[in-house]
Amino acid sequence: MLRFDIITIFPEFFRETFDYGIIRRARAAGLVEISAHDLRRWTRDKHRQVDDRPFGGGDGMILKPEPIFEAVEELTKREPSDTNYTQGVRVVLLSPQGRQFTQALAEELAACRQVVLICGRYEGVDERVSEALVTDEISIGDYVLSGGEPAALVVVDAVTRLLPGALGSETSAVHESFSEGLLDYPHYTRPPDFRGMKVPEILFSGHHAEIARWRAERALEKTKRNRPDLLERAQREDKD
Ligand code: ADE
């Protein structure tokens, strides 16, 4: 069982997002438990203030360290004096300054017992959070979101579908995009002729080996066109 604890100033954002499809089934099957916590719960002042002005000047407001530290300490049952988490616990800050989220990182998180996701907001988060509290600072891509919430949703989805049993017996995540360093091959279903656009003949041939080879070629072609960076990496790692 993997437990996700999301720390956010917008817990309502997550109200229904985990009630659909694979994530809903994984929750119902007890593979994963997901809770969104209001950061303001860990404030102590009358105004329940979670942010403050930046030292050194500049625009915008910065999320204060105290409520975030106390939230993580309570949710992971870590004493403030501890410097290490128990094995299998990861504390993630979602921010554009993080390292890139990848399928490999999703697989790492899927092997954990607890993943705490801290959603950044405003112009930033006090740097002591990334220095002394989080195990991983993660970005979902080179663009700036208005907050970490959509990124937390992306991480929960990508990780949950990797949990054993989440995809059901008929499908598996072993042979899909990125798992072998390339994009997926093209898929077709009925009708065989849609507005003059025909499904490639080879797929009706029944020759499994030739179909497999055709799919590999198309995957390679598409990767070359859309993601040459993936191809260069695959070549460096000496894959065929
Ligand atoms: N918060 C704002 N932008 C983000 C990004 N690209 N990834 C993760 N968290 C973010």
Image: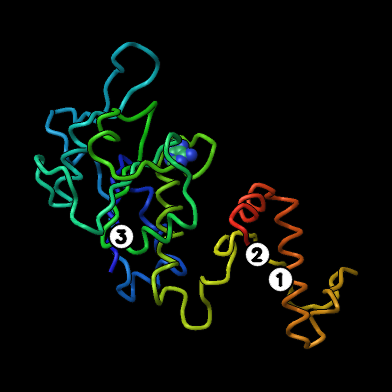
Question: Is 189 situated above or below 84?
Answer: below
- Residues at badges 2 and 1 in contact (C-beta under 8 Å)? yes
Calculate the distance from the C-alpha at mark 3 to the C-alpha at mark 2. Answer: 29 Å
Calculate the distance from the C-alpha at mark 1 to the C-alpha at mark 3. Answer: 33 Å
Q: Quadrant of ligand 1?
A: top left
Q: Which mark is residue 187?
A: 1
The outermost residue toward the top is 57
Instruction: Please state which of residues 69 and 145 is positioned toward the viewer in this rendering.
Output: 69
Identify the residue position indicated by label 3 in the image.
Answer: 34
Front position among marks 2 and 1: 2
Identify the residue position indicated by label 2 in the image.
Answer: 184
Q: Residue at x 53, y 78 (%)?
A: 171
Q: Secondary structure at mark 2?
A: loop
The C terminus appears in which quarter of the rendering? Answer: bottom right
* Image position, residue 126 (x, y; %): 28, 28
Tell me the kind of residue under disc 2.
Asp
Question: Crowding at label 3, few (<14), some or many (≥20) Cα neighbours within 10 Å?
Answer: some
